[in-house]
Amino acid sequence: MMLAAVLPAASELTMLYGGALASGALAGEISLLGHHFASGLPAYLAVVVAGVAGNTVGAAGGWLIGARGGQPLLERYGRFAHITPARIARAERWFDRFEGVAVPLGFATPLIRSFVAIPAGMFEIGLRRFLLSALPGIVFFCGLLAGVGWAVGTSWSSVHNDLTYVDVAVGVGAVVLAAYLLIRRRRSISMAGSADSPR
């Protein structure tokens, strides 16, 4: 969950699995800070607390990455991902305008949640304000997905397989999009080169 605050690292599956484990549908036990929890409400709460704590620490780390090196790194290497200074400025204006909603909603939304912390640090949102804004989204996400895992319980394996297909579809979509952007960029470079060459 720490890693999932800055990279899409299957936080959905982690919380679903934790909820299913807490329900007693899967073999295993929940332990937090040396305390072991039998299946039931205490185990569910332990899963949620662990998820929230890990995700909050990861969000603080992502914010620190953005605050210490985000802007210069994007300005230096962003062109490879079609991130121009104009797009950075537009994102900063958007963050300034919708920060109160963007941060909690971003952390409550699968996939998007991994791309909130670094920009927040980069655009100089205060750490305390950022974490207080992120916490409701993190709690909602962890509580909801652990609850779904609890409810699904014995159907865990089929839900896990369905979510694996979603992960694969997102990965394939990202590769296709990257290939499209690369081909488009090469075509525009070759067209610009042929337009500049003397006839």
Image: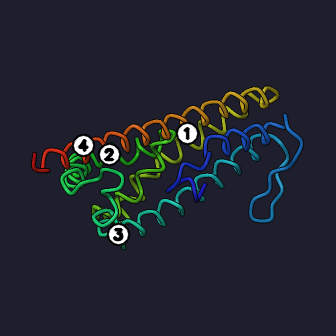
Q: Is 186 placed left or right of 140 in the picture?
A: left
Q: Which amino acid type corresponds to the residue marked 1 in the rendered image?
A: Gly
Q: Residue furthest left?
A: 198
Res 44 quadrant in image: top right
Instruction: Say if mark 4 contacts mark 2, CB within 8 Å.
Output: yes
Q: Residue at x 48, y 50 (%)?
A: 114
Percent position of residue 101, x then y: 32, 43
* Residue position marked by numbered label 4 in the rendering: 188
* Residue position marked by numbered label 1 in the rendering: 171
Q: Which amino acid type corresponds to the residue marked 2 in the rendered image?
A: Arg
Percent position of residue 73, x then y: 34, 67
How far apart are the two marked residues, 3 and 1, measured between alpha carbons? 28 Å
- Neighbour tally class for label 1: few under 14, some 14-19, many 20 plus, Cα within 10 Å: few
Q: Is 182 placed left or right of 41 in the picture?
A: left
Q: Mark 4 or mark 1: which comes first in sequence?
A: 1
Q: Mark 3 or mark 1: which comes first in sequence?
A: 3
Res 182 quadrant in image: top left
How far apart are the two marked residues, 3 and 4, measured between alpha carbons? 34 Å
Q: Is 111 placed left or right of 163 in the picture?
A: left
